[in-house]
Image (tube, helix red, strand yellow):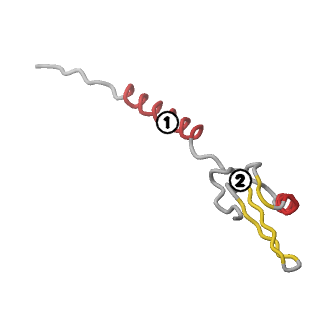
Amino acid sequence: MRIEKRTRPWPLITALIVSFVLGALITLISGPQTPRLGAATSGDARLAADVRASLTTEDGYQSLSAVRLQDGRSRTRASGPPETDTHRPR
């Protein structure tokens, strides 16, 4: 009669749990971050200040454009990093 030695699953289970926890931590640290409105602006500085003052938070905006129509004239403004700011006045 031959007796087989059974391997215990605990080392495998422990390795899987540790791998899962490390993967979750790495994902949380290096994962997507909430976009924030950058300091770069173009166009009317007064309009830029008015728009920034009206925002409750700058989180969630990567770039932002605004136009003010006043006395038959339009004033434009754009904010955000230059490489993502596609709404610059021409």
Q: Which element is circle 1 on?
A: helix
Identify whether 47 is placed above or below 83.
Answer: below
Horizontal side, residue 75 vs residue 28: left or right: right
Q: Dot 2, crowdedness within 10 Å: few (<14), some or many (≥20)?
A: many
Q: CA distance from mark 1 to mark 2?
A: 32 Å
Q: Quadrant of residue 5?
A: top left
Name the residue nearer the viewer: 89 or 68.
89
Tell me: 50 left or right of 21: right
Residue 83 image point, x, y percent: 63, 50
Report the quarter where the C terminus lies: bottom right
Residue 77, quarter of the rendered image = bottom right
* Residue shown at the point (54%, 35%) measured from the top left: 26
Q: Amino acid at mark 1?
A: Gly
- Residue 23 — which label? 1
Residue in the picture at 83% in, 75% down:
73
**In which quadrant of the rendered image does the N terminus lie?**
top left
Of the two numbered discs 1 and 2 on the same chain, state the one appearing first in sequence: 1
- State the image coordinates of residue 65 (x, y, percent, origin top left): 73, 64
* Relative to 58, 35 lies left or right: left
Label 2 residue SS:
loop
Residue behind mark 2: 80
Name the residue at the front extreme: 90
**Is 52 rendered above or below residue 17?**
below
Q: Which mark is residue 55?
A: none
Relative to the observer, which residue lies in front, 28 or 86? 86
Q: Residue at x 77, y 48 (%)?
A: 39
Q: Three-letter amino acid code at disc 2?
A: Gly
**In the drawing, does residue 72 fall left or right of residue 9?**
right
Camera-near label (1 vs 2) is: 2
Q: In the displayed structure, would residue 73 be above or below residue 60?
A: below
> Where does residue 23 sit, x and y in percent of width and height?
49, 36
Q: Nearer the viewer, residue 54 or 7?
A: 54
